[in-house]
Image (cartoon, rainbow, N blue to C red):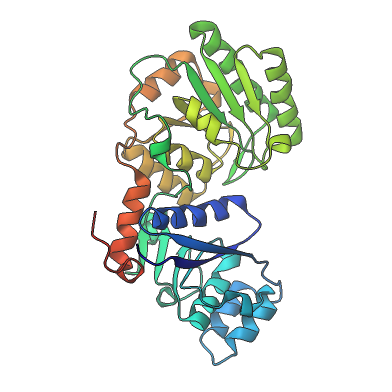
Amino acid sequence: MRDVLKILLFADNRPGHVQLAEGVIAAISHCRPVDVLRVDVARSVLFPNRLLARLLTTAINKKWLLSVAYNVDVNRLEGRELIVSSGGNTLGANILAARLLGAVNIFYGSLRQFDPLDIALALTSYEHHTTHPNIVAALKPSSLDPDEFPAYTSVDEVPRTLGVLIGGDGSGLFYTQEDWIGLLNFCQCFHDAFASKFIVANSRRTPHKTSDLIAQFAARNGAFVEFIDVRTAGPGTLPPLFAQSEVVLASADSSSMVSEAIWLRRPTLALYPMNGRLEHAEAVYRAQLVTKGHLAEISIEDLTPRSVLTHLTALTPMRNNPRQSLADLLRKRLPTLFGDLPSS
């Protein structure tokens, strides 16, 4: 058996970023055993990324910089062979640790002012950001293995259970309470028409008054609505939703929620509010997913049982396992991590 790969995971305070890094690590663990050390970092406001990028081009003491800019005890990192992180507040730490340890590093996200040569492999969801050989486009990964969930590769009939992922304002979109009321009214109408059930989950981004609204709706309609409230259930509670839901409706503000549903091969419908416009980079990413047939988009005000079924039946979820696809990509781009493993 291949030796255990010692990985350092830098984590910020954004669960979505951590999930992306964990998704990369999960793909690697698909091919070889790993040992992961998680180190939480908070970049000092005295060291913005622009300054860090400039300092990395100088002869400054890298150990000192990692310590003062990120409050990292460098002695804890000894022996780590791979650095993985996501999120701008981890990027400088990722590069510094890789230099100090002589380790390979992977980053998911935009490199901002940093030199692509400082990252062995940068993964991005935006195909138009692949301006350097070290930058490769890839679907936002999840630590969940699609093969552990029932596969729904098409919608040939009315889904019996629909998952609903609710976020909040973000990515240029602004949801009103009327938007959420409209979504819940749709759930009622769809149930009345087809007797289908809904599993609804909120997120840390969801306003409390919106979460309260959903909780009240679920309490009145417990026969067909289950509410997973992140305020009480905590993080990591979505696997049951994905396991039981044949399709997923996700508010369009969260690229991570949309991507995870697609990653798990669920026909996915992104729900837009009446107000706001998706940021350009995100709009391009969603357009890629729509073109591939993995995603459909609709305004909440246009939700009807017929319109939703029309969109869902036109989708073609991925048939392959995206975790395996990512593992294959990593093995191709970073063969030293996998050595003599046979190609799949």
Give percent across and percent down for residue 284: 41, 48
**Residue 271 visible at all:** no
Q: Residue at x 60, y 79 (%)?
A: 51
Q: Residue at x 49, y 16 (%)?
A: 304
Q: Residue at x 49, y 19 (%)?
A: 161
Give percent across and percent down for residue 230: 68, 37
- Residue located farthest toward the front when viewing the structure as drawn: 1
- Quadrant where the N terminus sits is bottom left
Q: Eyeballing the image, is 221 above or below 141?
A: above
Q: With 108 as the anchor, is 288 left or right in this view?
A: left
Q: With 284 as the anchor, is 238 left or right in this view?
A: right
Q: Eyeballing the image, is 283 above or below 245?
A: below
Q: How many marks?
A: 0
Q: Eyeballing the image, is 27 above or below 174?
A: below
- Residue located farthest toward the bottom when viewing the structure as drawn: 59
Nearer-the-camera pick, 26 or 270 = 26
Q: Quadrant of residue 122?
A: bottom left
Q: Quadrant of residue 43?
A: bottom right
**Residue 131 visible at all:** yes
Q: Quadrant of residue 76?
A: bottom right
Give percent across and percent down for residue 242: 50, 32
Q: Eyeballing the image, is 263 above or below 13?
A: above
Q: With 74 as the anchor, is 313 left or right in this view?
A: left
Give percent across and percent down for residue 98: 49, 77
